Image: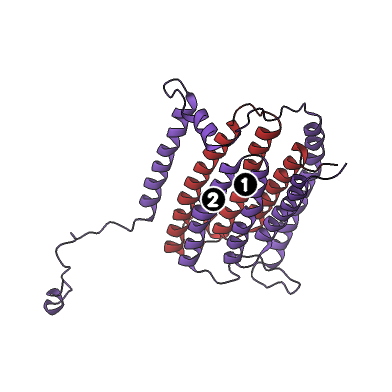
Chain colours: A red, B purple
Amino acid sequence: MHPFNLANCLTVSILLVLIGAFGVFRRRSLILVLLSVEIMLNGVNLAFIAFNYFRWGGTESGHYLYMLSIGVAAVEAAVGLSMVIVLFRNFRDITRDRVAHLGEVEE
Amino acid sequence: MPQTLPDILFAIAAVAVVLLSLSVVLARNPVRSTLLLIISFVPVSLIYVLMQAAFVGVLQILVYAGAILMLFTFVIMMINPEPHSGEIPAGSTGEAKSGKSGKMGALAAFLLLTGTGFVLIPPVHWAASHLPAEPVSKADFGSIASLSQLLFANPSENPLTVSFELISFLILVGVIASINFSRRDKVSAPQHTPPPYISADTQGEN
């Protein structure tokens, strides 16, 4: 009984993605939605490294994909948080419900 | 068969990372959520180290926890939301603000994602345990030297070099976009001439 194998790593990875998706659905603050997206990205990164170690162990392609992914995650966090700051400056409100009605005219 | 040290460490780290991520999603206070996510990166990087990806584990702590999550913390501190704002009120009292529909939505999301998990995890688990193993062959797998060989050896013909350098363009675009977003409205008067409402006695100071 060895728990350290590809199947268990992928299970943890799927669980992280599902937890992050639950956070995206549940949280109303935009910052915490972005934080939940980071949890999902974290699960995907775990799958990259696990496949690279257990299955395709020839070269470090999974490590390369991990670096690509954190680069994208950094850019996403920076742009998303600056949008949150603009929304906060304009509306004093960063809940999802406010942002869902951005295109509508204020009464 | 006796359990080896990697098995025990992996089991502890896997349970820890799932529990910590759950508490990130469920915590009421945004600052606490962010700090819990930073803590949850420690067992993740332990799993990376177990998979001979020590450099990736270092990147996880340095870049993810040290840079990206600090950015989140700074923005939360800057905006300074009330401790319970932006949350669906949990607990039996159920405040009037977003009470019932929010709770129903959270329940629906929970049921949907639990169902997805039950559908998704068993086949993936079965398939992954029946894949033929092709374990790591190199002795220095995951070391910085080996990784840089992969990325930068023979750069004129290596497609990974170009695509790796293209990440920096992506980051440049992100920097320009976030500066452009967070810039205030254009100043109508030039900076060096004081606006007319400044009286003469304060003008002399700058």
Residue contact between numbered discs 1 and 2, judged by CB atoms under 8 Å: yes
**Residue at (39, 47) in percent of width and height:** B175
Could you tell me residue B172's position as x and y percent? Answer: 39, 42
Looking at this view, name the residue that lies furthest to the bottom. Answer: B201
Q: Which residue is mark 1?
A: A42
Looking at this view, name the residue that lies furthest to the top. Answer: B157
Asked if A93 appears above or below A104 in the picture, the reply is below
Residue A59 shows in this picture: yes
**Residue at (82, 41) in percent of width and height:** A2
Which quadrant holds residue B93?
A: bottom right
Q: Chain of mark 2?
A: B
Could you tell me residue A14's position as x and y percent? Answer: 72, 43
Residue B120 image label = none
In the image, B190 versus A74, the foreground residue is: A74
Asked if B94 appears above or below A89 in the picture, the reply is below
Q: Which residue is mark 2?
A: B64
State the quadrant of the C terminus of chain B. Answer: bottom left
Q: Is residue B134 left or right of residue A71?
A: right
Q: Is residue B202 left or right of residue A52?
A: left
Could you tell me residue B108's position as x and y percent? Answer: 75, 54
Q: Chain of mark 1?
A: A
In the image, B173 versus B57, the foreground residue is: B57
